[in-house]
Structures are given as structure tokens and as C-alpha cells.
Image (cartoon, rainbow, N blue to C red):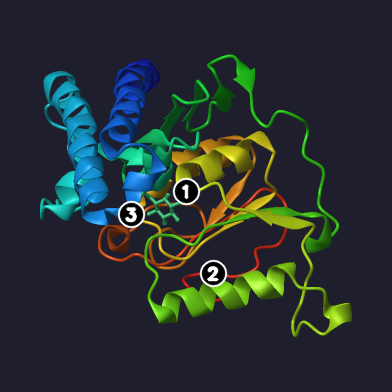
Amino acid sequence: SESEQESLLEFSIQVAKEAGAVILQGSKSIRQELGGSSGIDSKKNSVDLVTEWDVKVEEIVRNAVKEKYPDFGFIGEESYSKGLRPELTDDPTFCVDPIDGTTNFVHGFPFACISIGVIYQRTPLIGVIFNPFLDQLFSALKGHGAFLNLTTRLPLSPPSPLSSLSSALIGVEWGHDRTKELVDKKANSFSRLAGDPAFGVAGGKMAHSMRSVGSAACNYALVASGGLDLYWEIGCWPWDVCAGIVIAQESGGFASGGPHVNHDGDVTEEILHGRKYIVVRAIADTPGESGREA
Ligand code: IPD
């Protein structure tokens, strides 16, 4: 019912705030332990430390869910990577990234967040993204609009249709997977999006410019706010995008992607098992889809 959905949203917000405080504390403590960014090249060390905090934050959310919503499904980045891969059913299911933007988390670059989504009947229903570094809370319940810090409706200014990509500010990401195949695809897409055809860039569309903030969820929140016109990426996981889909859609945006999320933003079973995709747009035409080059 509507009131159940509202209390589910309130619960998700409360848990996100609790988790956010732990994320802030973790980011500080990691940097102290590593001795600032110079310690970050001891990669193994920093990966272990991140995992430790990821696990800690996911436990906070999982325990809270277990207590209040014991029958709900739970898909979390950390438990998924340890092999806990529940089937997606029609039942309500939490889809959680305890720390999205883990590289930022280690560096103290202030775009890292917790992302809590709730999927119901295979459709993202609730999205909560909390960035504790900037104290920004994005929340949305399907059909009820998207908000910044609970009261400011998104987008922040009324969107007007983009005349072309040349007026668009586009979020893109390198992601964690730096294999040649993926880096080549992304680099080709970036060059086509940014390149000026007048100077010989084949297929150049010359977007107004491009940005990388280092967190998929923050990109969605930026599209929802109106700061970015579009976000394009290959390689996201469901927990990176689930909350963001609701927030972007409820702000008037559009989420599109290949096998994992259909054109209405519904989550399909494959969202759990693959990792291609991502196009979110506010207004412009999507430049690509489904793990393909833009
Ligand atoms: C990643 C970040 C990154 C994006 C990747 C994500 P993580 O999530 O959102 O910006 O490029 O696709 O997997 O590992 O920081 O939770």
C-alpha cells in the first residue's frame, strides 16, 4: 500500500544516513592508515581496507533490513561478490551498494555514497542515494517525485529540451575494468563524443563537455538534479544503478540500457548476472546502448 511504501522509503533514508556516517569515518580512517594518497599504491592494502569498510557498511544495512523486513530479498555488492546471489523474484528486494565510488572513498574525493534501491515486481520502486561528504540525500518513490535533502524537488531548474549533443554536459566513467577491450570501447566513445569533426575527429559529435565524478550513483543524482544532461557508461552493476534509476526517472529523466534494464527502466533477471550497459539521459537522444560504443 501507499503508506507501506512511504514507510519503506523512510526506513531506507534512515539506514542510508546511518551508513553514511560510517562511510565518512571509514574514509578518514583509511587515509590515516595508508598515510595519505602516497600509501594508495600499495594496492592490495587499499583494496583490503576498502573491502573491510564495504563489508561493515553492508552489514549495517543488511541487519537493519533483516530486523524490519525479514521477508524481503537482499542483493548487496559485497555479499554478491562472496557468492550470495539470490534469484530476482517478484518479491520486494533491496539492492544495495554500501559504498559507490570506492576509489573516491579512498582518496577523500567527495563523490562517494551509499546507494539503496528497492525493487518490487522487478521494477525499481524506491531509490535513496546519500553522499555524506557533501551531505546530499537524494530520494525518490516511484510516482511521487525525486527530492534533494527531502524537501527540494528535482530537477533543480526546469529542464528544457537539448537542441543537440553539442549543448550537453555528459558524465562518463573509466570504471574498474581496465582490460584493453573495454578501455578501447570507452576511449573510442569518449573521443567521438568529445571530438570536433571540424578538426578531423571521425564521427565527432562534440558534446559541450564531459565529466567523470567516479561514482555511478552520483552520476544518476547529477542527471536528476540537472547538473549533467546525460550519463553514459559500460560496466555498471545493478546496485550501482538501482536507486539512481528511480531518482532519475522521478526527476523526469530516462534510463536506458541493454539486457539489464529495459527501456522503461525495469530490472530484468539478467541485471543480476551481467555487467554491461548504461545510458541515462535527461533530455538528449541516447548516444549508445548495451555495452556498445557511443
Ligand atoms: C563503480 C563506480 C564507478 C563506475 C563503475 C562502478 P564501486 O562502483 O560507480 O564510477 O565507473 O562502473 O562499478 O565499485 O565504486 O562501488
**Residue behind label 1 places its C-beta within 8 angstroms of ligand 1:** yes
Q: How many marks?
A: 3
The front one of 227 and 72 is: 227
Measure how far apart labels 2 and 1 are at the Cα level.
Answer: 16 Å
Instruction: Using the image, tell me which numbered label, if any, was put on residue 41.
Output: 3
**160 left or right of 184 in image:** right
Residue at (32, 37) in percent of width and height: 35
Earlier sequence position, callout 2 versus callout 1: 1
Which residue in the structure is indicated by mark 1?
A: 216
Residue contact at pointers 2 and 1, CB within 8 angstroms: no
Name the element at disc 3.
helix
Vertical order, 207 against 18 (above or below) = below
Q: From the top left corner, tell me how far across and down residue 88 is, in percent.
A: 22, 51
Would residue 51 be seen by someone viewing this image from the given angle?
Answer: yes
Q: Regarding mark 2 in the picture, which secondary structure is present there?
A: loop
Which residue type does callout 1 highlight? Ala
First-in-chain label (1 vs 3): 3
Can the viewer see residue 75? no
Of residues 161 and 71, the one nearer the viewer is 161
